Amino acid sequence: MLKTKTTISSEPVISRNGPTAEQVVEQIRALISSGQLHPGDRLPAERELAKQLGISRPSIRAGLRMLVAHGVLRAKHGSGTYIADGPPSLDSEQLSLLAELHGLTFDQMFEARRVLEVQVAGLAAERATAENLATIAEEVTEMYATLDNPQQYLIHDIRFHRAIAAASANPILATLVEMVSAVMYDRRRDTIGRAHDFKESVEMHQRIYRAIRSHKPGEARAAMHEHLELAHKAYRTEEGETEKKKRK
Amino acid sequence: MLKTKTTISSEPVISRNGPTAEQVVEQIRALISSGQLHPGDRLPAERELAKQLGISRPSIRAGLRMLVAHGVLRAKHGSGTYIADGPPSLDSEQLSLLAELHGLTFDQMFEARRVLEVQVAGLAAERATAENLATIAEEVTEMYATLDNPQQYLIHDIRFHRAIAAASANPILATLVEMVSAVMYDRRRDTIGRAHDFKESVEMHQRIYRAIRSHKPGEARAAMHEHLELAHKAYRTEEGETEKKKRK
DNA sequence: GAATGTGAATTGGTTTTACCACTCGATGGG
DNA sequence: CCCATCGAGTGGTAAAACCAATTCACATTC
């Protein structure tokens, strides 16, 4: 029978009040808080959970579905439901939807990036390990190698910023940077028609890298600030171009 | 019969591929992107959506449940499902769960707050409207009034920072500040036993407010930085206290 | 006539049951 | 020894029925 024997709680659950699905969320949350579940662990099967918690399977599924939406769980068809592993990450989908709902502008996103990444670059300059530096350097060389391929260049651009965020040694800030960057990437991926002043851009990245490698927070912040200002300006002209094309 | 007549799409949906629930999410997302749905609008009933999209009701519910988890929709029992209104907000629950999963520390949260709020205070000093200033001032006076009530004081503390974030005129940054603050509030609410140097704290808030009112970004940033440093230090001693109590 | 109570219709929430699609490991044949 | 095959177990989908909360029109009452 291969019973996993993963009884999740001796007590049949004291049957709390409130929406049934929320109860499931709370139960799983409690298990995570109490250290009974770790990233990568597999949850009991839905039918099993239903029996243990005394809740019908659809309700169990409703609760799990919410946690999947939050990125806390990962459901694998035919295999099981697992606690998310890998680096922590906030759902960029959420921010993306918010942006569309409230009409958040690119200007605002650039400003948010500036606030976050300038300081993050400073922290990275203080704390970057040899491994961090290697990763960042690698992306810079990749950017040089893909100067003529906007799509590829964009990917390494994002990874460069992600690597710096990782080097800040603050997973929360790294996650926030990742979330905002992901939304911008999703939107730019489709509209990034022509090559701009990529050469100038990559040199700027180079400069940021050098400042971080030299452990000079001030320079790193200044360079990142200047870079984002230029990128913002470049984007605005790019936006103008595509706007013109539309009108042709 | 009061039929809302809200046919959501003429076409019976070209039956895209992929997980059924995801299709629902994409459909709703598309409706939001295309401007057919606005905050506060009511969606067709689940049974109606099921017919229109040619998907079973449980699958519809699965998709809606995910959007509810993301905070994009709000389901009201007996009434209907609505597009979220009010100010944009990211689910703090998500960050909270991440924190527990990956063991994110308070030190990291304080650092994230410092990165965010110091800059946000600067922006607020540049852009705060009269109304913004009034809201901020009100919270300061409330803090004076609740110096002897830690619970109440904490609430106005959070609102003070929220008001400043709003004054930055950047909803993305405001949302990020809100999310991080909410997680910290949830945790501190229970552990905030004794009154610390609240008097010193409120005077610091006062100083931040004055800098913003005077439209002096530099001073605002400096004051906010100092405030968060002190708050961080205060928290660490507070943490030490409760730790001692536990061991008694 | 206005305020109020009542009940039917509508809507999301829950349960039950059944079946489908995918995964993975055991089993057996090559 | 390797690989194909099969089956048990898993999440995904579907249908039907009922529960519970809300809403609003309508009748009742003051």
Image (cartoon, coloured by chain):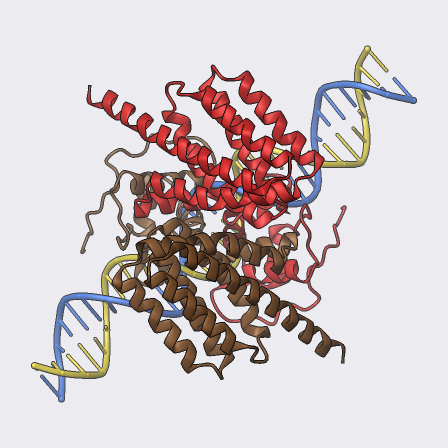
Chain colours: A brown, B red, C blue, D yellow
Residue closest to the eye, B14 or A102: A102
> Residue A55: which quarter of the image?
top left
Residue closest to the eye, B126 or B246: B126
**Image height check: is B245 above or below A220?**
above
**Residue at horizontal 50 percent and vertical 42 percent from the top:** B117
**Image height check: is B178 above or below D28?**
below
Q: Residue B130, how many percent across, how many down?
A: 71, 35
Residue closest to the eye, A37 or D28: A37
Residue A174 visible to an observer of this rendering: no
Q: Is residue A165 left or right of residue C25?
A: right
Picture mark count: 0
**Image height check: is C29 above or below B64?**
below
Residue closest to the eye, B24 or C1: B24
Q: Is residue B63 left or right of residue B213?
A: left
Q: Is residue A163 left or right of residue B224?
A: left
Q: Residue B240, how many percent across, how many down?
A: 27, 27
> Residue A16: which quarter of the image?
top left
Q: Is residue B213 left or right of residue B192?
A: right
Q: Residue B114, how many percent across, how many down?
A: 44, 42
Q: Residue A62, how many percent across, how many down?
A: 45, 48
Residue B216 visible to an observer of this rendering: yes
Q: Quadrant of the C terminus of chain B?
A: top left
